[in-house]
Image (spheres, rainbow, N blue to C red):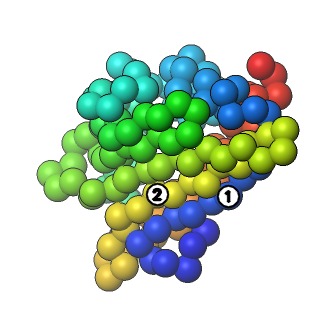
């Protein structure tokens, strides 16, 4: 995880071509196998979608996510917003997957930005989500291996 208190940064290598990794990042059925099942997701800028997971009342998280695709450039970059669908205020979180060809595989540089460095709850959330994203990216490897 990044030393920058506003960001989660992860770097993963997958021994699969960028097109295959992109498919796993952007196909709803495959996304549901490593992340969460999206509702209404399409890799098109402006697309609004939802996801559901376990609520975390101690972190003020309803378990319902609303996102918007900001950028989808196959097979290079997927950028989207990520917010609690039921929160009164938006976090301003932006999630980005950068795919870079490397040898016969793909390196993903993942960032999740927008954590308030002066807010204790935001920093606890950053720690929890950093571990969660690392686990999901490991799950992505399992999906890719099975494809």
* Residue 66 shows up from this direction: yes
| Neighbours of disc 2 within 10 Å: few (<14), some (14-19), many (20+) | many
Residue in the foreground of this view, choosing between 119 and 12: 12
* Residue 132 shows up from this direction: no
What is the number of the mark on residue 11? 1
| Quadrant occupied by the N terminus | bottom right
Which residue is denoted by mark 2 in the rendering?
A: 112
Q: Earlier in the sequence, mark 2 or mark 1?
A: 1
| Quadrant occupied by the C terminus | top right
Residue 64 in the image: x percent, y percent?
A: 34, 37
Q: In this image, 106 relative to 59: left or right?
A: right
Residue 54 in the image: x percent, y percent?
A: 46, 40
Q: Against 131, is 16 above or below? A: above
At x 37% / y 68%, what residue is drawn?
115
At x 40% / y 22%, what residue is drawn?
42
At x 52% / y 64%, what residue is drawn?
8
Residue 84 in the image: x percent, y percent?
A: 30, 46
Q: Quadrant of residue 105?
A: top right
Q: Secondary structure at mark 1?
A: strand
């Amino acid at each position: 995880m990044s030393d920058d208190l506003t960001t989660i940064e992860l770097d993963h290598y997958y021994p699969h071509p960028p097109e295959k990794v992109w498919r796993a990042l952007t196909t709803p059925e495959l996304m549901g196998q490593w992340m969460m099942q999206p509702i209404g997701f399409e890799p098109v800028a402006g697309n609004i979608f939802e996801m559901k997971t376990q609520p975390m009342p101690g972190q003020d998280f309803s378990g319902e996510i609303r996102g918007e695709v900001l950028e989808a450039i196959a097979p290079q970059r997927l950028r989207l917003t990520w917010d609690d669908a039921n929160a009164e205020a938006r976090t301003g979180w932006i999630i980005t997957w950068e795919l870079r060809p490397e040898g016969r595989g793909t390196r993903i540089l993942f960032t999740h930005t927008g954590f308030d460095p002066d807010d204790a709850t935001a920093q606890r959330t950053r720690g929890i989500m950093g571990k969660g994203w690392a686990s999901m990216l490991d799950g992505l490897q399992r999906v890719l291996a099975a494809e």
